[in-house]
Image: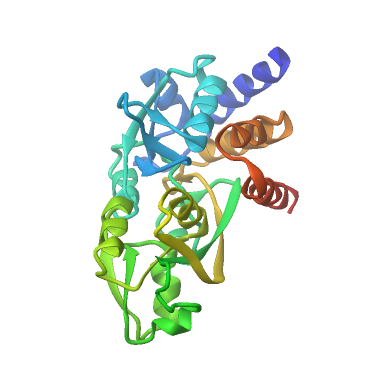
Amino acid sequence: MKRILVVIGLLALSFSLVSTQTEAKNLEDIIKAGKIVIGVKADYPPWAAINEKSDFEGWEIDLCRKLAYYLFADDSKVQFVAVTTENRIKLLNSGKIDIIWATVGQTPQRDQEVDFSIPYFESGVRLLAKKGSGISSIYDLNGKNVITIKGTTGAQALAELVPKAKQIKLSTTHEAIQALRNDQGVAFAQDDLLVFTMALYNPEFEVVGEHFNTTPWGVAVRKGEEDVKAFINVSLRLMYETGFIQDSLKKWWGGWVLDEYLRRIEKVFQE
């Protein structure tokens, strides 16, 4: 393992010398700052959330800390900044955070705004609805109010597939769940990962409809920061090959859901 870390360190130093756009931050800048600032979700358990002790925790948080360890040999050298789907790219491109590690699905539209690491996971979109809602397909949503999160792949896909659905666009998962509970919409369209979790912990809800719009997840970096992206790619590959990504996932999930999510990890890293 020490040998692997030495290799990572050498890669970091060599990539830091790569010329980048003048407005971009390179890996050397992050190293000089003594920490990496990462935009993460705060309301998306168990992927990333703030716990009762006001600490960030979750699967993506584990991966962020491992990245900091590879970079500084100290997993505490990371500063987490809570982001939303709506503001995360703005915060990145304004320089307030170094990277985004916040369940970011790679889409053609986002490719125009940021660069992405290699994929480390993938998800699709499903519907969460109250039991007995009568909704069994996304096509049942024509003319009905449907809750979405601004800027998500779920909102984008629903607009394309069911343009007559009336989207109630909110900013956070908490707002969306409350809106569904208060009958502001007949369903909530979001990543299948989240809706399965919400159904598990909220027995009044169930997952309905078909799985649609499969999207790979990547770590987002600013355009032109090739050395930062290269370091993240090397780190992700190392996390996968040493089993860290898989072992961390096992800490947060169990049962058939874990088996499905492990299958997705294998799929994206083998492609």
Residue in the image at 32% along x and 28% along y: 52
Query: Residue at position x 44%, y 21% from top?
Result: 31
x%, y% of residue 133?
Answer: 40, 74
Residue 42 is situated, as x and y percent measured from the top left of the image, at 34, 40
Residue 43 lies in what quarter of the image? top left
Q: How many marks?
A: 0
Across and down, in percent, residue 156 comes to: 41, 71
- 46, 239: nearer the viewer: 46
> Is residue 124 shown above or below 138?
above
Give the answer, above or below, for where 13 lies relative to 24: above
- Residue that appears at 49% across and 19% down: 75
Q: Position of residue 172 (x, y in %)?
A: 29, 53
Whether residue 17 is visible to the viewer of this picture, yes or no, is: no
Q: Is residue 28 visible?
A: yes
Please determine whether, in this image, residue 265 is positioned above or below residue 106: above
The one of 260 and 73 positioned closer to us in this rendering: 260
Q: Is residue 188 left or right of residue 206?
A: left
From the viewer's perspective, is 11 left or right of 198? right
Image quadrant where one finds the N terminus: top right
Identity of the residue drawn at 67% across and 51% down = 260
Q: Quadrant of the C terminus?
A: bottom right
**How is the model colour-coded?**
rainbow
Q: Quadrant of residue 51?
A: top left
Horizontal relation, residue 86 to residue 124: left or right? left
Q: Nearest the camera: 250 or 113? A: 250
